[in-house]
Image: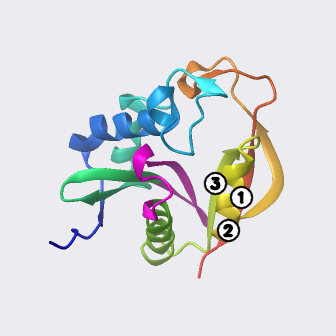
Amino acid sequence: MAEQAMTVRAAGPQDVPAIVALVESAYRGDSSRAGWTTEADILQGQRTDAEAVATQVADPDSVVLLAERGGDLLACCHLERHDGYAYFGMFAVRPLLQGGGVGKAVIAEAERFAADEWGVPEMHMTVISVRAELIAWYERRGYARTGQTSPFPYGDERFGLPQRDDLEFELLVKKLP
């Protein structure tokens, strides 16, 4: 029997709990250690919450894309439209599926969506600068380090509980076709 194809769709309000659960499982706690994108050693606490995701889903200049196979949520990402670029974030792949090509397919679809649906020429994202392996993965997808950094929001528990004092975000940019 052939494996079902992965499909990508925009999230609706009914998807918020599943999105939060996926994002938390991919970045925080012991479940995240099954994949390679865990932040469990640098951040504890929450990665996102239902209120933040519901706001993203409802925003007309925003879309949360869901990758599914047979109704099972495999991955998600958030795109936010800005003047001249789309911001890419909240990218999560189920930990046991990481490294299997799902993430590559989702980021490619996000880039296609941003270019084709919104007509923006660039994709921007910020990555915690100490995440060298993750930054290298994005560089292999055509993202360039800009050297532009912004401070990590220490003291704002909505972003997690930092386990080190050297965290900052670095801006990565990719020109879209």
Earlier in the chain: of badge 3 and badge 2, it is 3
- Say which quadrant the N terminus sits in: bottom left
Earlier in the chain: of badge 1 and badge 3, it is 3
Foreground mark, 1 or 3, reads: 1
Residue 151 belongs to the span the image colors magenta: no
Q: CA distance from mark 1 to mark 2?
A: 6 Å
Q: Residues within 10 Å of mark 1 (few under 14, many from 20)?
A: some
Q: Are marks 3 and 2 in contact (CB under 8 Å)?
A: no
Residue at 64% across, 28% down: 41
**In the displayed structure image, the side of residue 155 where residue 109 appears, left or right:** left
Q: Are marks 1 and 2 in contact (CB under 8 Å)?
A: yes
Residues shaded magenta: 79-102
- Viewer-proximal residue among 173 and 166: 166
Q: Amino acid at mark 1?
A: Ala
Q: Residues within 10 Å of mark 2 (few under 14, many from 20)?
A: few
Q: Which residue is label 1 attached to?
A: 136
- The answer to whether residue 94 is visible is no
Q: Which residue is label 2 attached to?
A: 140
Q: CA distance from mark 1 to mark 3?
A: 14 Å
- The answer to whether residue 144 is visible is yes
Residue 85 sits above or below residue 23 on the image: below
Q: Are marks 1 and 3 in contact (CB under 8 Å)?
A: no
